[in-house]
Image: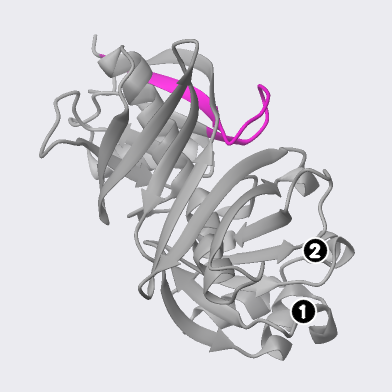
Amino acid sequence: MSKLTFYIVDVFAEEKYEGNQLAVFRNAGKLSDEEMQCLAKEMNYSETTFILSEERRNGGYDVRIFTPEKEIPFAGHPTLGTAYVIQREIIGEPVSKVILNLGIGQIPVTVNYKEGKAEILWMKQKAPVFGKIFDREQISEVLNISKREIDDRFPVQEVSTGLPFIIVPLKTLDVLKKAQIKKEAYFELIENTDAKAILVFSPETYKRENDLNVRVFADYYGVPEDPATGSANGCLAGYLVKYRYFDNDRIDIRVEQGYEIGRPSLLFLRAEEKETKINVSVGGKVIMIAKGELVNQL
């Protein structure tokens, strides 16, 4: 009887059962695409990852990422959560860096330790690419808010660091709280865009020590609302620097997400612009929740 080991971790979590949960399957190279997709749907998390082999290739570990609906080339919290599992369960000793071979290429994850245990993990994302700018009236209809509640000092724009998102600056936390996706308008919008998910953010926060509050809507990927989204926040970090949201060409901030759905999360964003290129890093904690075995899958 073949067994496949898997782990459940919370990513961008300050405490257990916070942040964004993730299932990580180990040594899963013999699974078919269909089996991976079925397992991702069965787990029903925002993403599920599969470490294909415990042997490194080109300096990194081959990893595939699936949402309940489809495979995607990159996502933030699966990258950090999987790097944590690789360091803790496969490598088994402190290392400064873990490299993942993903659909978009190699992503390095830096691991900081406290008392010998991984504390904060950081991933350096690809340089942001800025795309289509959207009409505020169209976006307000999708979010079921007034266009006057969108901060018109900054554009509503598509941004990608490997996975594209539509970034929407809102004026207040109250507006962010009441935003909700009108599905018909949402699916009509994304028919003609590379970005299939929407990030909204507010300068007002639930906790005073945080700098921004974020929500991410991703119905296209089978995730009505995500509790913590590293890829989207990487896009946001590039956006904040490009448009000098904090009146600076660099940021080092704390972002809260997931409060509206009962999964409070904390992400750390660092970005700076150097010689017209914006460098982006996203960090957070990872907490081990459970370990299990799947039988008769190989």
Q: Is residue 190 left or right of residue 89?
A: right
Q: Residue furthest left?
A: 58
Q: Which residues are magenta?
A: 3-21
Q: Is residue 29 left or right of residue 294?
A: left
Secondary structure type for disc 1: loop
> Residue at (47%, 61%) from the top-left corner?
272
| Structural distance between the alpha carbons of marks 2 and 1 | 10 Å
Percent coordinates x, y for residue 120 in the rendering: 51, 30
Helix, strand or loop under label 2: helix
The three-letter amino acid code for the residue at tag 1 is: Ile
Dot 2 amino acid type: Leu
Classify residue 295 by image quadrant: top left
Residue under circle 2? 176
Quarter of the view holding residue 38: top left
Q: Which residue in the protein does label 1 denote?
A: 150
Q: Position of residue 271 (x, y in %)?
A: 49, 58
Residue at the spot 60% in from the left edge and 73% down from the top edge: 244
Q: Nearer the viewer, residue 101 or 183?
A: 101
Colour scheme: one colour
| Residue 176 coordinates in the image, percent (x, y) | 80, 63
Q: Is residue 61 above or below residue 197?
A: above
